[in-house]
Amino acid sequence: MAERKAAKKVAKKSPKSTQGFTDEERAAMRERAKELKAAARRGPRAKKADGESAVLAAIAAMPPPDRVIGNRLHAIIKANAPALSPRLWYGMPAYAKDNGKIVCFFQSTQRFKTRYATFGFMHEANLDEGAMWPTAFALKELPAAEEAKIAALVKKAVS
């Protein structure tokens, strides 16, 4: 009985069990709240131009390797899916359909302190293929072969 109480006290003192979210996750939620407030203030008309400048600013704030990848991804997506609107999503560059639904996003290494950046697709992307298909890709660099693969995936995602 005494061991059980001691275990409960240790569990209660653990910051992970009482807080539930990491510092990075809480920061992402705060970013998303700021994005929603800013969007409400701007109104629906200024959405696309403001979204692009916010995405470019977020990319510019990334560390150099991620900044290079982010700028290339931005150019690839704009060239292959001009119907998608750039916007921030939890502080990350993302690209959405006209209905506001996110199709794809780029997450830098600094976002959640990972060893690689991530380019991912949401369920709005038309990438379904059989019973299983990838929805996110790890990126350490972006050579021409991978650029071509990403361009093809982005085209398919918006088809």
Image (spheres, rainbow, N blue to C red):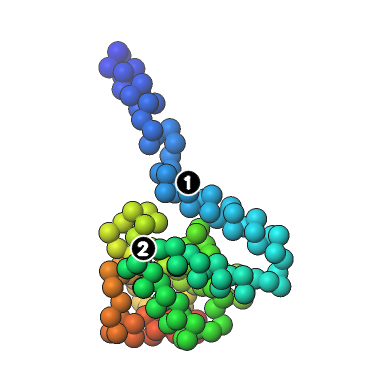
Residue 24 pos. (x, y %): 42, 49
Query: For this rendering, which residue is in front, 103 or 88?
Result: 88
Q: Residues within 10 Å of mark 2 (few under 14, many from 20)?
A: few
Q: Residue furthest top?
A: 2
Residue identified by numbered label 2: 63
Identify residue type, mark 1: Arg
Q: Tell me the tag on residue 26.
A: 1
Which residue is rendered at x = 71% and y = 73% of the image? 45
Q: Nearer the viewer, residue 57 or 112?
A: 57
Say which amino acid is labelled 2: Pro
* Quadrant in the picture for the N terminus: top left
Q: Is residue 35 above or below residue 121?
A: above
Q: Nearer the viewer, residue 7 or 150?
A: 150
Q: Is residue 49 left or right of residue 63?
A: right
Q: Residue 32: x percent and y percent?
A: 55, 55
Q: Quadrant of residue 112?
A: bottom left
x and y percent of residue 147 in the render?
A: 34, 82
